[in-house]
Amino acid sequence: MKNLFTSIRTLCLVAVMCMVSANALAYDVHDGHGNINVNPEYQPCKILVVDEDVTVDNCNVIDGGVLIIKEGKTVTVTTNFVCDNSTIYVYGTLNIEQTVVNHNIDESTVYIMQGGSLVGSYDSWRSTISTDVAPATVGSIGKVDAQVPTPANSFVGWPDYYQQRIYSTDGEDFYPIAYYEDAACTRPITDLDAWKTKYSNIYHAAYDAGAAAAYADPTAPGVRMKVTKKDGKIYQFDTKEVQSVDYIEVTE
């Protein structure tokens, strides 16, 4: 139990470190305090994600910035709202009803996603404001290559999976808005961390169940299935190579 607890704790720490690293390189998350300012010309932040309800005096998304308001979250702007040459994705609610100075959307694109809303009036110039946008129609799909869980990486691993990505204007950074097991995006992953942990635990259990000397690190993702017949014959399959399985009732 002690070894299991230590491994789980290590896995959690590694996962947190990966999330922090990803945030630093690809996008920022609003900390819930202060104004919203997204300006890639003068800030390292190209993509800003709001994942909690916030009320700000000013919201400025300019010069190629990208603002994403997550599903179920509300951004309320009380004084000044400007979106200039930028892009906003509203999965939740953008409330600019109380703005008293500027409420302009110039040369920009605003996506009001299905279930999202934009509250308040605004001036629009050379802009596109789309409503009831289907989530699958924005961004693009990118593959995340598999990583085999081994003792060397504290059993942190995953099979190939796919991200629906919203990219920065320059195409260099992105925010993964959704995750899928398949390239066709028919099998969504609702909890990525839990999905990875479930996959990794299979390898961890195999390691714990066998002698250390007998255990060999896998060389590729996949789970091996072993079938032992009553006559003692043993058949082994790598499940990633199995195309289909049929169960047929026969007379022994």
Image (spheres, rainbow, N blue to C red):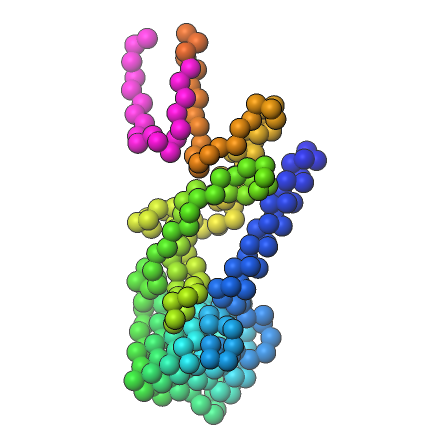
In the image, taking residue 94 as reference, residue 106 lies left or right, namely left
Residue drawn at (51%, 73%), measured in percent from left and top? 44
**Rendered-image quadrant of the C terminus:** top left
Q: Tell me: residue 165, above or below residue 88.
A: above
* Near-viewer residue (249 or 164): 164
Residue drawn at (54%, 84%), measured in percent from left and top? 57
In the image, taking residue 132 as reference, residue 152 lies left or right, namely right
| Residue, far bottom | 101
Question: Where residue 28 sits: x, y (%)?
Answer: 52, 68
Question: Where residue 10 sits: x, y (%)?
Answer: 64, 45
Residue drawn at (54%, 64%), measured in percent from left and top? 24
Asked if residue 239 is among those painted magenta in the image, a careful observer would answer yes
Q: Tell me: residue 102, above or below residue 209.
A: below
Residue 94 visible, this angle: no
Q: Which residues are magenta?
A: 234-252
Quarter of the image holding residue 224? top left
Q: Tell me: residue 43, above or below residue 166.
A: below
Quarter of the image holding residue 102? bottom left
* Near-viewer residue (117 or 213): 213
| Residue, far right | 2
Residue 202 visible, this angle: yes
Question: Where residue 148 sits: x, y (%)?
Answer: 49, 39
- Count numbered badges in the picture: 0
In the image, taking residue 39 as reference, residue 130 lies left or right, namely left
Asked if residue 228 is among those painted magenta in the image, a careful observer would answer no
Question: Where residue 84 sits: x, y (%)?
Answer: 40, 83
**Rendered-image quadrant of the N terminus:** top right
Quarter of the image holding residue 235? top left
* Near-viewer residue (87 or 79): 87
